[in-house]
Image (cartoon, rainbow, N blue to C red):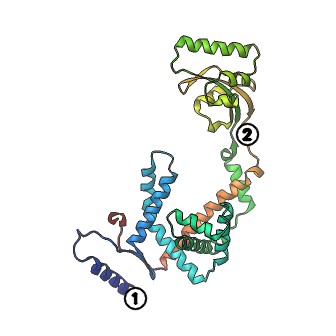
Amino acid sequence: MNKSFKFIVVFLIVFLIFGLSHAQKLVEAIVAIVNNDVITLSDYKANYDELYQTMRAQSQGGDFMAQFDLAKKHILDTMITNALLLQEAGKQGLNVEEQLKMSLDKIKEENDFKSDAELIRAVEQQGTPFEVFRKRMEENLMRQGVIFTEIRRSIVIDDSDFVDYYKKHPEEFIEPAEYKIRAIYISGENRSADELESKKKDIDGKLAAGADMAEIAGQLSEGPEKETQGDLGTFKSNELAVELRDAVKDLKVGELADWLEMRGGWFRLKLEEKKESRLKTFEESRQQIEMKLYQAMEQEKMKEYLNKLKARSYVKILITNPEDYI
């Protein structure tokens, strides 16, 4: 179909559906044309809603909306890219039936589903028709097939590049110090300063007399660590709260830190084990380097490929801000 004629047809479709009134709310419209496919407003809304729900479920902090506002700017471009890749998969005649079957079998195995019926029931309980779920998986596998054929298969990185990166970026391969900590905690709630001092002196006296800290923690600690006889666990330095890290970083194994006021009470900490910070060897770091360099090259090649794909395709955006209409 002639490109200009295609645009006129689409314009007339939109015009006939919605008439002349700009005030009329759009229920359906064509947002973009991608070769012989169209992206509709309902398609866009489905992707918008899915992204919102996914990010909301994964959100850990209060900056969810800021993150979502950033991510939603790429929805339409991602939909166009997905359409182009799927069209390429069709041109290449990719058949992913076997990969799809293996993927579904893996889902059943990982979730201990005994039959297809159990899988179907579990999917549809989440509010998605199974055929829609299956179609999404199939299309994703087809897009991945194009990416592998056009991009990943061509990536080659020399061993010398790995070694060079390791030498130039040693700070990325520092393994932080690791501490195993035991603690006794006493609450400051409903206690006077004198009562707190008396409690601390009693514990200090028992420790000075050679009492086992684990035993004392099991008897006298007033936090959840009482159940583990004061064992807080093993932590890398970057995993510890600043106050805890500062309290133990200069201790020798077996030494006690001074009482530390924190979380509405007081902690007496003991350093039980320590591994010093060190530079990991190249062999220990190799997999991390390979992944980083591979991903960087993949992103570069992906950008080049998509630019070429879009340049040789007919892509027309009819509604630049579809979010305004949903």
* Numbered tag placed on residue 158 in the rendering: none
Secondary structure found at label 1: loop
Tell me the tag on residue 278.
2
- Indicate the position of residue 263 as horizontal and vertical percent values: 54, 27
Among numbered discs 1 and 2, the one appearing first in the sequence: 1
**Identity of the amino acid at label 1?**
Asn
Residue 280 x %, y %: 74, 45
253 is higher (above) or lower (below) than 53: above
The answer to whether 154 appears left or right of 243 in the picture is right
Occupied quadrant, residue 319: bottom left
Residue that badge 1 annotates: 2
**Can you say whether 121 is above or below 146 in the image?**
above
User: What whole-number distance in Å separates the C-alpha atoms at marks 1 and 2?
Assistant: 65 Å
Depth check, front residue: 59 or 273: 59
Picture quarter with the C terminus: bottom left
- Residue drawn at (64%, 75%) of the image: 149
Q: Position of residue 153 (x, y in %)?
A: 67, 72
